[in-house]
Image: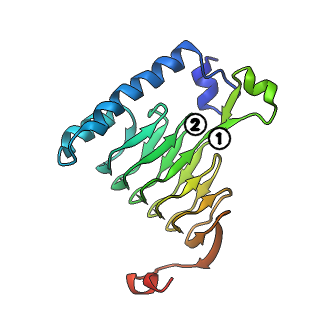
Amino acid sequence: MTEKEKMINGFIYNPVSPQLVLDRDKASRILTKYNKKVFHEVNMRNRMIKKLMNTSGYFWIKPPFFCDYGYNIYLGKEVMVNFNCVFLDVCPIIIGDYTLIGPNTQIYTACHSLDYKERQENKEFGKPVRIGDHVWIGGNVTILPGVSIGDHSIIGAGSVVTKDIPANVIAVGNPCKVIKDQKNVSIQSAKRI
């Protein structure tokens, strides 16, 4: 198995392998151009980002945007990623249809050993992140490796998501915890939360 295959599948891998260094360089070059484009250049930006990640429909990613590789990011249709988000995609990040991601959100799949000797030897691994359909993630949210967020859930601004969040809930805090079950929250009821 190549180091890239090990990385994508969550096995221990060496991040300084030549192939992975070149892949990160390619992503960096595309994102440098992407992040410099004027915001009204939507079609040009979308063509650029499609060279980097997997999409199944129209999407909005407001620059600046940062990621490691891009090819491990899977966006559903009508996904909106707000300004200044960071996706560390050593493993897949799967984002469902009609999901909204607030500014400064960080999604991490990269993990490091607790043993300093292994960290010194460039040993890393990752865990995928899955976000369902119709999810709303507030600004300044951090989502840790291996987390899944169920369909229709809301994650409050500033939350740190350390464990799976089920579908149809509102969750907030550090660590993020469910505070309310919800099925069909209207705009009026959401204002009271």
Asked if one can make out residue 141 in the rendered structure from this viewpoint, the answer is yes
Question: Label 2, on which residue?
Answer: 91
Determine the CA span between mark 2 and mark 1: 6 Å
Q: Position of residue 123 (x, y in %)?
A: 71, 25
Q: Position of residue 119 (x, y in %)?
A: 74, 27
Say which quadrant the N terminus sits in. top right
Sequence order check, earlier mark of 2 and 1? 2
Q: Which element is circle 1 on?
A: loop
Note whether 157 is above or below 67 in the view shown: below
Which residue shows up at 52% across the image and 64% down it? Answer: 151
Q: Locate residue 49: give its quadrant.
A: top left
Question: Label 1, on which residue?
Answer: 127
Q: Answer left or right for 161 relative to 106.
A: right
Q: Residue type at mark 1: give it.
A: Lys
Marks 2,1: beta carbons within 8 A: yes
Which residue shows up at 38% across the image and 81% down it? Answer: 187
Of residues 136 and 172, the one nearer the viewer is 172
- Mark 1 crowd level (few <14, some 14–19, many ≥20, 10 Å Cα): many
- As drawn, the label of residue 4 is none
Asked if one can make out residue 51 in the rendered structure from this viewpoint, the answer is no
Q: Answer left or right for 80 relative to 171.
A: left
Q: Answer left or right for 92 relative to 127.
A: left
Q: Residue type at mark 2: give it.
A: Cys
Q: Position of residue 152 (x, y in %)?
A: 49, 68
Which residue shows up at 36% across the image and 55% down it? Answer: 80
